[in-house]
Amino acid sequence: MKLSYIAIRVLDLDKSLKFYTEDLGLKVVEKREPIPGEQVIILIDEDTKQRLNLMHYSEDCRLYTPWKPDGVELDHILFEVEDAKKTFKEFVEKGAPVAMELMERDTDDGHFAMGFVKDPNGIWVGFRSLSNNKKDSSR
């Protein structure tokens, strides 16, 4: 068994598409409307081949349910990045709300960093890195 994709329900399809493509670098694979009122945009991370589907339902769609603004339907999405501190800072500077402040610590394996922002739907998006070297005092 292998994971095929993750699908998230989005409130504003345009804002979500911008966040996941322009800000996170995922690529659009396909756009479709399988049933009336349903819009699906399939995204892929070209490096890992992981897929993410953005799902939007209009009020007249049979799958529509009222929006829950807290983003708790999906706990979080985590991206492995080269430098979590740098990536986290870049997203905050672009206006992404902080969900959980950056955590950093030295481990036996190197320097660990992880922090979370919220996407336009309130879903937590995390950035995690583990460098081979311990954090130096000049940082």
Image: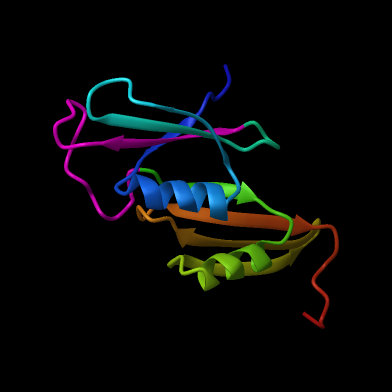
Relative to 75, is 57 on the left or the right?
left
Residue at x 83%, y 76% (from the top left corner): 136
> Which residue is rendered at x = 66% and y = 67% of the image?
85
In the image, is residue 1 above or below residue 139?
A: above
Res 138 quadrant in image: bottom right
Residue at x 21%, y 28% (from the top left corner): 63
Number of labels in the image equals 0
Q: Position of residue 59 (x, y in %)?
A: 15, 37
The color scheme shown is rainbow
What quarter of the picture does the N terminus occupy? Answer: top right
- Relative to residue 54, is residue 61 drawn left or right? left
For this view, does 86 lie left or right of residue 32? right
Please say whether residue 68 is one of the residues in the magenta stretch: yes
Outermost residue on the top side: it is 1
The main secondary structure of the magenta stretch is loop
The C terminus sits in image quarter: bottom right
Near-viewer residue (46 or 48):
46
Relative image position of residue 15 (x, y in whole percent): 39, 53
Q: Please tell me whether residue 30 is drawn above or below residue 131 in the rendered image.
A: above
**Rendered location of residue 121, percent (x, y):** 35, 52
Extreme residue in the bottom direction: 138
Q: Which residue is located at x 17 percent, y 25 percent?
A: 62
Which contiguous range is marked in magenta? 50-73
Q: In the rendered structure, does residue 58 fall within the stretch colored magenta?
A: yes
Q: Tell which of 65 and 13 is nearer to you.
A: 13
| Residue 112 to residue 31: above or below | below
Query: Residue 49: where, in percent of width, then height?
Result: 64, 31
